[in-house]
Image (tube, grey):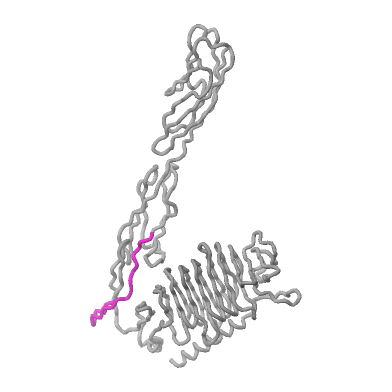
Amino acid sequence: MTGVKKRISVVFIAVITAIAFMPLIGTQPAYADGVLPIVTVGYVNDDGSYHHIALNADNPYYINGAEEATTDPEGANAYYDAVDGILTLDDYDGASIDVRSGFGDLKIVLKGENKISGHSQFGINVPGNLEITSEEGGMLSIDVGPFDENTYGICSDGNTSISGDADISVSAEATGASDMAVSISTGEYPLYGDLTITDTASVSAEAVSEVDSACGFLARKITIDTEYMVSYQGAGDQYSKAMRSTEELIAAEKCQISLETTGNDISSIVSDTSLLDQFQNNELRHVDSGTADGRVFFRYEPHEFNAVITKATPTTDGEVRTVCPVCGFDEFVGMIAKANGYKLSYTTTTYTGKAKKPTVKVTRADGDVLADSQYKVSYSNNTNAGKAKAIVTFRGEYYEGVKTIPFTIKKAANPIKVSGRTAIVKYTNVKKKAQTLKRTKVLTVKSNKGPTTSTKTSGNGKIIVAKKTGQVTVKTGLQKGTYKVRVKVKAAGNGNFKAKTRYATMKIRVK
């Protein structure tokens, strides 16, 4: 085990050294008057090279894809307040954010959906303290690598705090012969920086190292006080660590850890590393992982454990236990969170004559999205206007039960069309007796849904319009001439279409 610890120490020294002295990748720009910028943002050119933009008090704004900073805030995706040290990102899409050495702390405010990506060695690099917060659910996705050296998603030489309702995901991948991938790293070696996640911030991290090691959260102390889940997934041929602090280490050949928040200081997360040597020598096998009393643990046992699963439902949690059929050892492994969150892609739609099938997103009580392989969705009463249902039927190894989710199909607009026509009656006939005209002679009514009624709204008093039939009567005594009559036609609608009123002007010509 001594050799393993020594190797880990060497790797982490290399990590922090790289963080402290890491330059910007690509050609460094020349700065006017010898003045270094405080913050640089970067993007990838069409040829794959990096272009770096300096943001300072004179030119604080940057627009995605631009080749230089500007003083004009119009359309800006990044704004740097050099006085307060605040960088605001608003739908930013770039390759890196770097605080130049000697300029210290940085606060990042997220608005909208922001992205940092590219074949780079780091996403955010700060030589001092780093604070990330958000306004109105600001999001940030960081995806760096694959890079053939040590790769870092977020790194600061001081403390890092994530607060507000920030939604952050970090992915780092390294592919070199001797490399490390780190999602979030704080503090120089020995680790003195703290990582703090508070409010309703949500953080997920994935670190992948094909050869050496991967670490999701690297800090002196890790404190999580948030109602959402902070998760980590790593894969490394040698070591994969969810969290690494100064004195404690989580190490396993492969690990995938979801850490449920407790509102407490979780700096004491440990594993029994004395078993690691035996595991690597194949004397023991890794049975399972879990959480207990705020600690993540790995268990290595020689027993042949059988999993006993109590399935979760939409209203109750399930659980997984391990039972050894030889000795009868029975141990709680973990809870299966109930599937009690349901979101339709839409809850209200309009009748079209076709069946409506909104997609369903199912989440567990712990906030995780449930894989769609764990359930199937069917529908009921989902064609005609009215109350429809999406029916989620759970299946598989971990879930059972049925959940019905209502949605509404509204009536469509009535497509009725009305236009007036000109009807001619002879004066000699009108002198003798009243003349009757069918509605089709004076009005064209098309595409109406439901029965129609006609109401005269203006026109000569000797011209009468029948409400139910739309028939027009021209009374005796009407003199020669052309008479305009304004008519309101209303389609009553039906089960799938609304009522609709249209107006038209018809003409009665007496000659």
Say above or below: 498 vs 219: above
Q: Which residues are magenta?
A: 322-341
Q: Is residue 479 left or right of residue 395?
A: right
Residue 454 falls within the magenta-colored stretch: no
Q: Nearer the viewer, residue 300 or 32?
A: 32
Q: Quadrant of the N terminus?
A: bottom left
Which image quadrant is residue 54 in? bottom right
Q: Residue at x 54, y 13 (%)?
A: 425
Q: Residue at x 35, y 86 (%)?
A: 284
Q: Is residue 125 left or right of residue 219?
A: right
In the rendered image, residue 69, in percent from the top left (x then y), is placed at: 69, 67
In the rendered image, residue 458, in percent from the top left (x then y), is placed at: 52, 23
Q: Is residue 58 left or right of residue 422?
A: right
Q: Quadrant of the C terminus?
A: top right
Residue 338 falls within the magenta-colored stretch: yes
Say above or below: 435 vs 140: above
Q: Nearer the viewer, residue 151 or 114?
A: 114
Q: Nearer the viewer, residue 218 or 137?
A: 137
The answer to whether residue 181 is visible is: no
Which image quadrant is residue 345 in? bottom left
In the rendered image, residue 501, in percent from the top left (x then y), is placed at: 48, 32
Residue that sits furthest to the front in the current view: 83
Residue that sits furthest to the bottom in the current view: 2
In the rendered image, residue 149, in percent from the top left (x then y), is placed at: 58, 80
The answer to whether residue 156 is visible is: yes
How many numbered callouts? 0
Q: Nearer the viewer, residue 30 or 71?
A: 71
